[in-house]
Amino acid sequence: MLKKLILILGFTVLAFAKYELKPEKISDTVYRFEGALEEPNKANGGNMVNTYWVKGKTSWIVIDSGPSYNYADAAYKAMKKIANLPVKYVFNTHRHEDHWLGNNYFKEKFGAHIYGTKAQAKEYPAGIVPNYSFVISKEDYKGTKVIAIDTFITKDQVLELDGRTFGIKHFDYAVHSPEDLMAYMADEKVLLAGDILFSQRIPRITDGSVEGGLKSLDVVETYDVKVYATGHGKFTDKTAIGQMRNYFLALKETALKAIEAEQDVLTYQNTADFSAFKNMYMMDELHKGNLAHAHKEYEFY
């Protein structure tokens, strides 16, 4: 009976995540919380995303607020130890839930101004119950609400936020999602790339485009960058560019060959050789879906 009780208590503890977030300084004013290289689940509380904090003159500027209200709370408590400042601005790079479900924490606590895309607002209007509410535990999701975006970014522009200058790149074609944003800090040569860049793991492209991904990498390489702040993965050098370009090119080349050989999607998924990417994270979870998407994209290329 005692063993059974211990097992039950152990399962209860593991049923939700305790966000133990440790910020890493990656430039003079930019800090990163690095997420896990796996799918969101109850054990990790959806913490599989990189989020970034920029120290302004009188406040923090948050680039992607993370997967839940409680994640945002844990992040703020960690950053408060570095500088006890409010959060005045939150910038969402794209519409995927893991990146912005902490928005309402900063709105409720500080009245923060939220920047984002119309694609995010269209897919997740204020008040909707997102998929993440079923993916992570009730304990981790507690307090989380989908709120309205205050200002839409619809074109390339420069934002001056609390003494920091951000050159915003707006992608009006599908890349990782139907509408993606990047923010460039020229003074520190930091590119806050969101999910335009991944390292160590493959991206999910079923919401975006292989061609758009390749085109976006050409754009990324026009910037003078010392630090690449990626949406996922630990590397801050050019590693992510090479890994993503190699994967996108392999998808394009194999899809075109399969179509030329009149292979159907299932045959393509089962025969395409991607052994060169076997050590990348999320291959088992995402790769076959990416192959199907690439086949469809290039069918009439």
Image (spheres, helix red, strand yellow):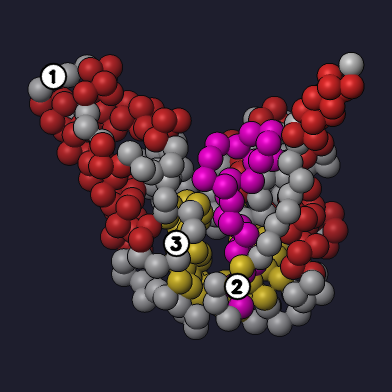
Q: Give the prevailing secondary structure in the magenta stretch.
A: loop
Based on the picture, tell me whether residue 117 belongs to the magenta stretch.
Answer: no
Magenta residues, start to end: 29-53
Q: Residues within 10 Å of mark 1 (few under 14, many from 20)?
A: few
Q: Residues within 10 Å of mark 3 (few under 14, many from 20)?
A: some
Write the residue at 55% across / 36% down.
39
Mark 2 or mark 1: whose residue is earlier in sequence: 2
Res. 90 image quadrant: bottom right
Q: Which residue in the protein does label 1 denote?
A: 262
Residue 84 in view of the camera:
yes
The amino acid on which the numbered mark 2 sits, given as a three-letter code, is Lys
Estimate the x, y position of residue 273 in percent, counting from the top left.
21, 32
Residue 299 vertical position relative to residue 198 in the rendered view, above or below: above
Residue 214 vertical position relative to residue 44 in the rendered view, above or below: below
- Find out whether the residues at labels 2 and 1 contact each other: C-beta distance under 8 Å: no
Measured in 3D between alpha carbons, the distance from the residue under mark 3 to the one under mark 2, in whole angstroms, is: 13 Å
Q: Is residue 57 left or right of residue 261?
A: right
Estimate the x, y position of residue 249 in percent, counting from the top left.
23, 45
For this orientation, the residue located farthest to the left is 261
Estimate the x, y position of residue 123 in percent, counting from the top left.
59, 36
Write the residue at 28% across / 52% down.
245
Q: Which mark is residue 25?
A: 2
The amino acid on which the numbered mark 3 sits, given as a three-letter code, is Phe
Mark 3 or mark 1: whose residue is earlier in sequence: 3
The amino acid on which the numbered mark 1 sits, given as a three-letter code, is Glu
Q: Which mark is residue 199?
A: none
- Element class at badge 3: loop
Based on the picture, tell me whether residue 52 belongs to the magenta stretch.
Answer: yes
